[in-house]
Image (cartoon, rainbow, N blue to C red):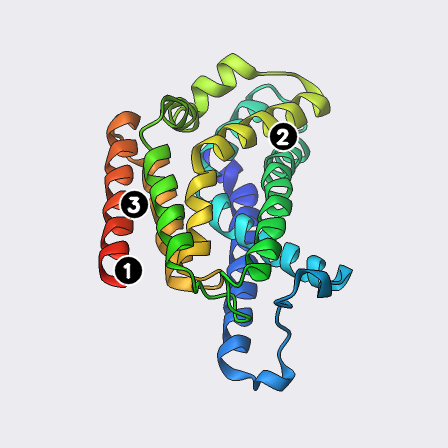
Amino acid sequence: MFKAQIPILAALLAVILVAWGWLFYQHWQMLSLPMSQMWMPPSDTAAWRVADFALVYSMWAVMMAAMMLPSVIPMILAFHRVCRQRTIKHYRLSYLFTLAYLMIWFLFSSVLTLLQWQFHGWSWLSPMMDNQSTVLAVGVLFLAGIYQFLPIKNACLTHCKSPMGFLLNEWREGVSGALIMGLRHGAACLGCCWAQMLVMFAVGVMNLPAMALITLLVIAEKWLPVESAVICKAGGVIFILWGALLWTFQS
């Protein structure tokens, strides 16, 4: 059974590695290139051009793929396994399911792009996309922490932690079914993790260690065999304490 899943797993890992490789390359450019050779988002919102929006959007879209795809591997493999058992075109449907899932995060990347555009205009982010507003950082951390305690977070995480439960309740046949299921699972994951993604504005948009830590947190939430409510509250305490300490030492 596992041997039949190797191609889809290899494809997922390849996309994840390419996405992280691109992020490392962008980070290296920011550290190594002289300022005169480096593209940076304009500080004035009126100065943004289509190319600036496109570059920032591409950055967020790749970041969402790099950070979220690792956590959804069990769901994609479960979907692929069910498709194979039903002797239907499992590879094509699995790729469509994954693409539909990513489309939700690519749409959310548009929201993140618009937020970044406005934050630069308010001088809350530096041209290097680092945070330079304690209010923004603390506000984002408190928002992420409080959201962890809300019932909707627990409901979305419970959904994401049960791949077979999702497939049993949401199964639909064919290409349209794979797309619908991918969109629905993506929406549940967005409901689970959107506030955690905003934390990147608090720590610096291209902060690679922070990306890795948030990715590990998302994976732990979805993979650990612990009740979702417990994991949610633990994460909430961490974010709120982090925000409180930041406010104490920087205010």
Residue at the top extreme, as displayed: 169
Q: Secondary structure at mark 1?
A: loop
Q: Secondary structure at mark 3?
A: helix
Vertically, is 106 above or below 52?
Answer: above
Give the amino acid type for the residue marked by disc 2 in the picture.
His
Residue 219 visible in the snapshot: no
Going 58% across and 16% down the picture, which residue do you hit? 171
Residue 94: image location, x then y, percent: 61, 33
Residue 225: image location, x then y, percent: 27, 30
**C-alpha distance separating marks 1 and 3:** 18 Å
| Camera-side residue of 75 and 215 | 215
| Nearer the camera: disc 3 or disc 2 | 3
Disc 2 or 1, which lies upstream in sequence? 2
Quarter-of-image position of residue 38: bottom right
| Nearer the camera: disc 2 or disc 1 | 1
**With 155 as the anchor, is 68 left or right in this view?**
right
- Residue that badge 1 annotates: 251
Residue 8 visible in the snapshot: yes
Residue 71: image location, x then y, percent: 43, 41
Decide: marks 3, 2 in contact (CB < 8 A)? no
Give the amino acid type for the residue marked by disc 3 in the picture.
Phe
| Camera-side residue of 248 and 182 | 248
Total of numbered circles in the picture? 3
Disc 3 or 2, which lies upstream in sequence? 2
Give the amino acid type for the residue marked by disc 1 in the picture.
Ser
**C-alpha distance separating marks 2 and 1:** 55 Å
**With 146 as the anchor, is 26 left or right in this view?**
right
Going 22% across and 54% down the picture, which residue do you hit? 245
Q: Which mark is residue 239?
A: 3
Residue 10: image location, x then y, percent: 53, 49
Disc 1 or 3, which lies upstream in sequence? 3
- Residue that badge 2 annotates: 90
